[in-house]
Image (spheres, rainbow, N blue to C red):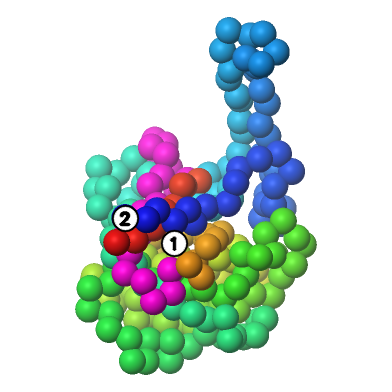
Amino acid sequence: MKIVDLSQTLENGMSVFPGAPEPSFEMLGNVPEGDVYQLTKFEMTTHTGTHMDCNTHVQPEGYCTDTEQLDIFIGKGVVIDCSGYDNGEEIGIEIFNGMNMEDKEFVLLYCDWAKLWGQDKFWGDYPYVSMEVIEYLAENDRIKGIGLEYASLDRLKEEELPLHKRLMQEKKTVIECLKNLDQLIGKDFTFMAMPLKFKSGDGSPVRAIALVE
């Protein structure tokens, strides 16, 4: 079995959503410098770096990061190659043409966007999915969530987050800021994105991985 790391690194100076507070990592103990133990203090929002959104991110009721239903964060995944779509172009329902989705639980979209991580362009005009795609995922009882390389399921200018809200009317998860999805095109794999167990958390940074048989 091969494990593919799909997560960006959390560190000082990293990329953050425009207007969000920057994370801070402060070393309180340093073994190489003679301290008995090493300890790091960190501060960040629950939507920093590669992270997942619970539906309570945009809904008044739903599941949170401390749910006991951990199966909603793991399942059989599929990567769809959307790298042919231009910046700002809508990704339509045609991406599912000819695909067997019977056993798929997480749909991950590869747009070749992760290469821009750390650049201002990362927060630019990325390709985005249509409401028709969201309706398809929302109405498919087997689908647990969608994963993206870019910053948000909605376009940055969509302040009301209509795609988030529609998908999360159902018990679905959104995972954002993934990387290395190109390594999974055409592969059978299990996707996993476990949140930290924050009390009533609306989301969490995750170490997203793919287990490839």
Residue at 42% x, 39% y is 196
Q: Position of residue 115 (x, y in %)?
A: 66, 65
Give above or below for 38 relative to 124: above
Tell me the tag on residue 140: none
Image quarter hosting the C terminus: bottom left
Give the Cα distance between marks 2 and 1: 26 Å
Magenta stretch in the rendered image: 184-204
Residue closer to the observer: 177 or 163: 177
Give above or below for 81 relative to 203: below
Q: Residues within 10 Å of mark 2 (few under 14, many from 20)?
A: few
Was residue 85 drawn as part of the magenta stretch in this picture? no
Secondary structure category for the residue under label 2: loop
Residue at which label 1 appears: 174
Residue at which label 2 appears: 1
Residue at 67% x, 71% y is 157
**Quarter of the rendering containing residue 187:** bottom left
At label 2, which amino acid type do we have? Met
Residue at 60% x, 79% y is 127
At label 1, which amino acid type do we have? Val
